[in-house]
Amino acid sequence: MFFGEFEHALDAKGRLIIPAKFRELLGTSFVITRGMDGCIFGYPAERWATLQAQLDDLPLTRKDARAFVRFFYAAAAECELDKQGRVMIPATLRQYAKLEKQCVIVGVSDRFEIWGAEHWQQFETETAANFDDLAENLIDF
């Protein structure tokens, strides 16, 4: 399970260090793609295969399903970590997530997310202000 928040810098070549505890969960190959809220989603190969099956079940006749699947898959990249535990973030994904120098890698259960540090700070501030309301509307502990 992915959890925690880690800050790392994107290098000049577009590589980002993936936290060691996430590397253990990712194995030799994983997938990154466009995520929600302007971040990048990262999936271990096994979880990606499950998600792929779910997306394949969406009706081809639905315009919104075609658009979502097309947009989601178009930016997907199969990745491997280098010997220093870094992943190369493709330019299209760096632009989509507005990644600059400082990035935040966030564990979210079955996936991890990569955020530009400023964007993450904004999201975190807005969400913290509404956290109690979100919990009340979504979860019964």
Image (spheres, helix red, strand yellow):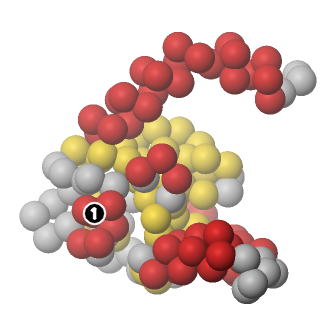
Question: Which secondary structure lies at badge 1?
Answer: helix
Mark 1 lies on residue: 94
The amino acid on which the numbered mark 1 sits, given as a three-letter code, is Arg
* Mark 1 Cα-neighbour bin, 10 Å: few <14, some 14–19, many ≥20: many
**Image side of residue 14 versus residue 123, left or right:** left
Q: Position of residue 121 (x, y in %)?
A: 35, 29
Of residues 66 and 77, the one drawn nearer to the viewer in this rendering: 66
User: Which residue appears at 73% of the width and 85% of the height?
Assistant: 60
Q: Is residue 84 visible?
A: no
Q: Position of residue 122 (x, y in %)?
A: 36, 28
Quarter-of-image position of residue 141? top right
**Image side of residue 9 versus residue 44, left or right:** left
Q: Position of residue 113 (x, y in %)?
A: 48, 53
Quarter-of-image position of residue 69? bottom right
User: Which residue appears at 43% of the width and 21% of the height?
Assistant: 125
Q: Residue furthest left?
A: 12
User: Which residue appears at 68% of the width and 14% of the height?
Assistant: 132
Quarter-of-image position of residue 88? bottom left
Q: Is residue 25 visible?
A: yes
Image position of 103 with respect to 41: above or below? above
Q: Position of residue 134 (x, y in %)?
A: 69, 23
Image position of 77 with respect to 14: above or below? below
Of residues 43 and 17, the one drawn nearer to the viewer in this rendering: 43
Of residues 104 and 126, the one drawn nearer to the viewer in this rendering: 126
**Image side of residue 140 versus residue 26, left or right:** right
